[in-house]
Amino acid sequence: MDDLGRWLGEQAGNIVSFVGGLIVAAIFYWLSLRPKRFGWQLISSNGIVSAKGRSLPLKVVYDGQEVSSPNIVVMKIGNAGKSAITAEDYDGPVRIQFNKSSLLACDVSGRLNEQITASVAKDTSSSVVVEPTLLNPGEWVILQFVTDGPLEIPTVNARVAGQTSPVNDVAKAHAKTWLPFLLGGLILALIIPILLAIFLVGQAKPWIIH
């Protein structure tokens, strides 16, 4: 065991360098990947009339029809990957579905630049479709919805050629990009003290007098 401890102590620097090299190589390989990633992000979801306001003698009418719980939902959809998504990459339109509330109106309220030709159209009483359009990396479109019913986050369904991950919340996906760095740092933080302790023990052994 003394010989093993001494050997580990002598090789501590090489072991740390080897493990660190593997971690750095894995991180650079992960960063070099260029997946297609269509995603979405909820910007805001607010009721036009609060629960307390509904007890007041206030009537909200939309298009001649009285609504009881009107809401404004603002959502961003776009390309969160590192490769362009062309119109031909989509397997049909992007569908945005409200499951608990009815949809009153929808519109494109913003876009990264005027060259993005996205258009949204009401599909059913609770869903819309967005026509496929070219989205370069980082390009996005902001959609605004007026709904009647409970506040909710709609579901986004899209199928894009070459996309290996499901369509998900861009903000949560970005948070996961730091995972390899955190894991790599954690591994090094655990290994370095252990190897340093072994190194010190290995160096101290020859000076112990029995």
Image (cartoon, grey):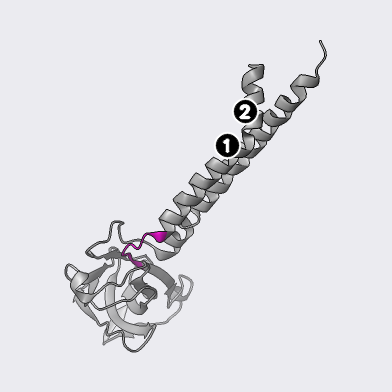
Relative vertical location of residue 131 with respect to residue 11 in this rendering, above or below: below
Which residue is tagged 1? 15
Q: Is residue 69 visible?
A: no
Mark 2 element type: helix
**Tally of numbered discs:** 2
The quadrant holding residue 110 is bottom left
Q: Is residue 190 magenta?
A: no
Q: Which residues are magenta?
A: 32-39
Give the image location of residue 20, x and y in percent. 55, 45
Foreground of the two, 207 or 101: 207
Residue 8 — which label? 2
The Cα–Cα distance between marks 2 and 1, rounded to whole angstroms, is: 9 Å
Which quarter of the image is occupied by the C terminus? Answer: top right
Category of crowding for the residue at label 2, using alpha-carbon neighbours closer than 10 angstroms: few (below 14), some (14–19), many (at least 20): some
Q: Return the residue found at the far top.
A: 210
Foreground of the two, 179 or 106: 179
x 33%, y 77%: residue: 145
Give the image location of residue 109, x and y in percent. 36, 84
